[in-house]
Image (cartoon, grey):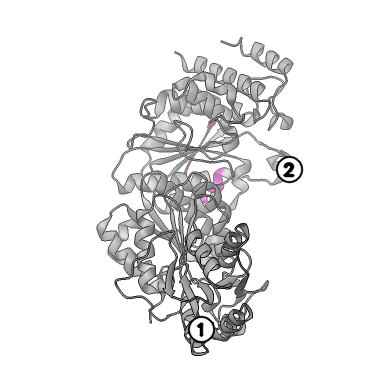
Amino acid sequence: MIATRDAYGEALKELGKINENIVVLDADLSGSTKTSVFAKSYPERFFNVGIAEQNLIGTAAGLAAAGKIPFASTFAMFATGRAFEVIRNSVCYPNLNVKIAATHAGLTVGEDGATHQALEDISLMRSLPNMVVLSPADGIEAKQCIYEAAKHNGPVYIRLGRAKTPVIFDENYKFEIGKGVELKEGTDITIIATGVMVERALTASEKLLEEGIKARVINMSTIKPIDKDIIIKAAKETKGIVTVEEHSIIGGLGSAVAEVVVENHLTPVVRIGTMDTFGESGDGFKLLDKYGLNVENIINKAKELL
Amino acid sequence: MELKEIARKIRVDIIEMLEASQSGHPGGSLSAVEILTALYFKEMNIDPANPKSEDRDRFVLSKGHGTPVLYGTLAERGFFPKEELKSFRKLGSMLQGHPDMKEIPGVDMTTGSLGQGLAAANGMALAGKLNNKDYRVYAVIGDGECQEGLIWEAAMLSAHYKLDNITVFLDYNGLQIDGPNKEIMNIDPIDEKFKAFGWNVLTIDGHSIDEIIRSIGEAKETKDKPTIIIAKTSKGKGISFMENQVGWHGKAPSAEEAQKALEELGGAK
C-alpha cells in the first residue's frame, strides 16, 4: 500500500538530483503534498508561495519562461479550480513547461468533505489546449508519470491521491504518455478505469469471471491525449464499455471515452463516477462505496451491457 | 536618435496600427510610451537579432491590452518589420490582440488577462537568481489592474524573496473602462500599499524620460527589495481629444480622427 502522493515526493527527490532545472513550488501544503521531501534535499530550488494558488501557477509560468521545469503542487481542488484561468492563460496558451501535480483528488480525501473533494479537475484540465492529463493508478505508475511529465515539453497535469492504495504494478511496468494498457484480456465486456478505481475494476473483473463473464480491463492513466486505438479496439471486440473514475461522470474519463465511441458509431458506454452531486465528509473508501464507485456497481453495470 | 523623437514615432505607430485594425486600446498605450521608450532604447540589455538570449533583460506587459505600445516599440527597435503593424488584430497575423510570446519576437510573456503578469515576472526573476544571471526583469502593470487579488499575492512574493532584480512600472493614468479608478474601486493610497508590502516605492512623472531613467537607476541600486515606480501618466497622452478620456480606453480612431491625431504628432514620419 502506498499513496500516489508519497510516490510523488520520492520521484521529485530523485529527479532533483538528475536535473537541476527542476524546481518545486507549493502553496503551504508541502507536508501534505510531499513536496517537503524535495524541499529538504534542495531548499534553494523550492518555493513556498503561501496560501495563494493563482500565484503558485503564475510564478511557475515565469520560471518556465526562463527555462526551469517547475512542479507546482497543492490540493487538486485549488490547483485546478482556484487557479483555472491562470493555468489557461499563463501556462497553456503560451504552452509553457509547467507541471501541476495535484494531490488529494476525489472522494478519498475523505473527512474534509465536499469543499476539498475535487470531482471536476479532470474535466477542467482536459478542456485546455496543450494540456496533458495524467491519472496514475498506483504508486509505481505515479512515479513514472512524474518522470515522463518532466521529460515532456509542455504543460502536464498529474492527478494524485491522499489515501494509501494497493500496489498494482511491479517495477517492470512501463508507463507511456498517451497509451492505455490492457491489464486483463476479455471478450465479453470492457471496463476502462483510471486512478484508484483501476484496482476495483480488476476485482470486479475477477468476480465476473467466476460467473463466466470475461471482462477486459484497461488502465487509462492518460486521460488526454486519450488512447483512441485501444478504445475503438475494445468497442469492436466486446459488447460494451463501462468507465470507472473517482470523478464526476461529467467531463472526465467517461466523457472522453464516450466521445471516441460516439464519433465512431461503436457500442454502448456506461459511465461510473460521482453523479451530478457534491460529496460529503466520511471515510474515503466508504464514500467510494456510498457514491457507487464500488465493485458491485461495476459488476451490475457490466452485466446490463450483456 | 533622441528618445523624445522615438517616443513620437511610437505614438505615430500606435495611431496607424489602430486605424488599420479598427480595433484596440489607444488610451493605455499612449500613457506608457515614455516608459517603453526608456526601457527598450536606453535601459534594457536586449538584442533584436537574438530575442531569446538567456542573458537578456525581460519585459512583461502585464496590462496586456497595451499591445499597440509594445508592438510599436518592438517594431521601432527592430524585432520585426514595421510593415507587420498593419496586420495588428487581423486574421492570420502574428500580432494578436494581446501579447503572444509564441508568435512574436521580443515578447517575453503572454499576457492579457489582467493581474497575471507580475507573478510571471517574479518567476523570471527567481530563475535569474537561481542561475546566477544578472539580467533584470521589468514589468508594466496598470492601476485598474491593481484591483486583481493576484497582483497582491505576487507583490508579497517579490518582497518575501527579496527580488531586487525586478522593477515594476505602475502606469497610473487614473482611468479604467468604466470610469475613474477613484469612482469604480479606489486603489489609493497605492504607494503606501506597496510600501506596506515591502517594496521600494518611487513616484515620478511617467512622461518624463529623464525621471524614468533616473528611477530605473535607483531601482538598480536598491538591494534586497523589489522596486515599483509609480508613473503618473495621462491616458491618451499626446492626442488632445484622447487625453484623459474614459471613452478612448478601447476604441480605434476613424480615418478622420487618425488624421487629426497624426497632425498633432507632427506628421506620420
Q: Is residue B269 above or below residue B38?
A: above
- What SS does tag 1 mark? helix
Could you tell whether A44 is left or right of B91 in the image?
Answer: left
Identify the residue at horizontal 73%, vertical 40% (top origin).
Answer: B178
Tell me where residue B139 appears, x and y as whole percent.
48, 38
Residue beneath disc 1: A204
- Tell me the magenta residue range: B191-204
Q: CA distance from mark 1 to mark 2?
A: 63 Å
When asked about the image quadrant of residue A299, the answer is bottom right
Chain containing mark 2: B
Identify the residue at horizontal 57%, vertical 62% (top origin).
Answer: A256
Residue beneath disc 2: B183
Tell me where residue A69 appears, x and y as whole percent.
37, 52
Could you tell whether A232 is left or right of A1 in the image?
Answer: right
Identify the residue at horizontal 68%, vertical 71% (top origin).
Answer: A276
- What SS does tag 2 mark? helix
Quarter holding the N terminus of chain B? top left
Residue placed farthest to the left in the image?
A17
Pick whichever, B260 or A276, lies toward us. Answer: A276
Residue type (three-letter) at the residue carrying disc 1: Ala
Tell me where residue B98 appears, x and y as whole percent.
57, 36
